[in-house]
Image (spheres, grey):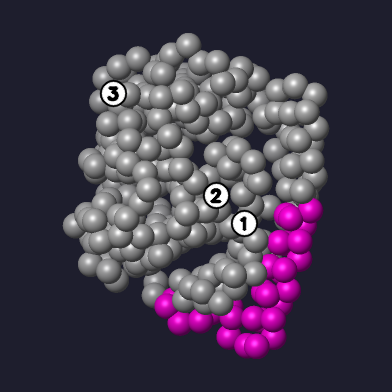
């Protein structure tokens, strides 16, 4: 809950700082909570002004997700379908969206800067960078997070794969709402783990260009790491989605039909009152020793990630050379 609140509070602070509060909304799907998230989450006044919670009842959530731990494709589609904006962007609940992204995005759609692609008809994707677990577990303040991002982003190597960047962990994926309607969001058959974003990309590739936002404009998304397992496969206990999700041979652009995102289901919508205690001062990075520890953690994490991605890239090249499926 702290990670969710922090992600929302952080981006809303940035939205207000550049005067875009009338142009952005935050939509959260509350998937099967016994106690509504809006009753307990601690948001700033700015964040509570911009955030809506769409509540999917526990009974309906259980029916849709079957034996899965979490029907994420439904949850994401519910939020996208009930969004009101011209562009709909998906982020994870623990990913920080920086002011650099907001300025870049609004500059493009308002014609203040130029892009070599049609933003209205393009699937835009960016990978994310990690903030180390030993830093995040201390629950840093918003100012701590700003310092960590601003001072150390240049030595924080992206998790992006050197191939098929749209198969990386999602920093953000974004489309004009017309594309969301055409593609029907995520395939709602993929109620288990992995490949749901890959499936979305492989359906879109046949008809629309995909742009690596991170490579073109910079990596402006930072994940609040919550696992201390290093390079160990962190989700080996989960049931995976079927392999066909990775295929490029998709017979239908929209496999969900017109009711994607539970369009015909009436769901309760709620907001929350501001209850965040101001911690805008530095809370964790108050000393040079603390900042040095953070820098060392980022460097070690980056080296591990670079090594891991190099191995994956060599594996990809080997598969391609042998004419085998490479995803």
- Give me the residue at 55% from left, 39% from top: 166
Extreme residue toward the bottom, this view: 288
Q: Which residues are magenta?
A: 279-307
Mark number displayed over residue 127: 2
Give the residue pinned by disc 3: 263
Q: CA distance from mark 1 to mark 3?
A: 36 Å
In the picture, measured across the screen, residue 184 lies left or right of residue 136, that is left
Q: Position of residue 109 (x, y in %)?
A: 26, 52
- For the residues labelled 1 and 2, the Cα–Cα distance comes to 7 Å
> If you read the primary sequence from the N terminus, does the residue marked by circle 2 or circle 3 appear first?
2
Would you say residue 206 is visible in this rendering?
yes
Residue at the extreme front of the image, as rendered: 116
Residue 241, percent from left and from top: 62, 23
Q: Is residue 211 left or right of residue 88?
A: right
Chief SS of the magenta region: helix
Secondary structure beneath dot 2 equals strand
| Quadrant of the image containing the C terminus | top right
Q: Mark 1 near mark 2, Cβ–Cβ under 8 Å?
A: yes
- Mark whose residue sits in front, 1 or 3: 1
Q: Which residue is mark 1?
A: 158
Question: Residue 111: within the magenta?
Answer: no
- Classify 10 Å Cα crowding around label 3: few (below 14), some (14-19), many (20 and above): few
Tell me if 245 is positioned left or right of 326 in this view: left
């Amino acid at each position: 809950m702290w990670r969710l609140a922090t992600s929302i509070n952080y981006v809303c602070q940035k939205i207000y700082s550049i005067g875009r509060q009338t142009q952005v909304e935050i939509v959260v799907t509350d998937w099967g909570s016994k106690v509504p998230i809006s009753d307990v989450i601690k948001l700033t006044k700015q964040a509570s002004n911009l955030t809506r919670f769409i509540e999917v009842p526990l009974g309906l959530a259980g029916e849709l997700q079957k034996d899965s731990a979490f029907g994420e494709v439904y949850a994401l589609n519910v939020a996208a379908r009930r969004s009101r904006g011209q562009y709909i962007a998906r982020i994870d609940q623990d990913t920080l969206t920086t002011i650099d992204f907001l300025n870049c995005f609004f500059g493009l759609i308002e014609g203040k800067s130029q892009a070599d692609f049609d933003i209205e008809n393009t699937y835009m994707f960016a990978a994310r960078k990690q903030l180390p677990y030993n830093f995040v577990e201390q629950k840093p303040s918003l100012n701590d997070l700003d310092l960590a991002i601003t001072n150390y982003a240049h030595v924080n190597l992206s998790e992006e794969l050197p191939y098929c960047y749209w198969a990386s962990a999602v920093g953000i994926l974004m489309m004009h709402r017309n594309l969301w309607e055409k593609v029907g969001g995520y395939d709602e058959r993929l109620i288990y783990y992995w490949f749901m974003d890959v499936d979305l990309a492989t359906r879109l590739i046949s008809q629309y260009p995909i742009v690596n936002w991170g490579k073109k404009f910079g990596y402006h998304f930072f994940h609040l790491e919550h696992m201390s397992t290093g390079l160990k496969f962190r989700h080996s206990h989960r049931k995976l989605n079927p392999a066909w999700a990775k295929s490029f041979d998709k017979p239908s652009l929209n496999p969900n039909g017109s009711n994607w995102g539970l369009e015909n289901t009436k769901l309760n919508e709620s907001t929350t009152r501001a209850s965040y205690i101001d911690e805008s001062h530095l809370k964790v990075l108050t000393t040079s020793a603390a900042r040095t520890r953070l820098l060392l953690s980022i460097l070690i994490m980056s080296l591990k990630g670079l090594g891991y991605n190099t191995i994956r890239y060599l594996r990809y090249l080997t598969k391609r050379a042998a004419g085998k499926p490479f995803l």
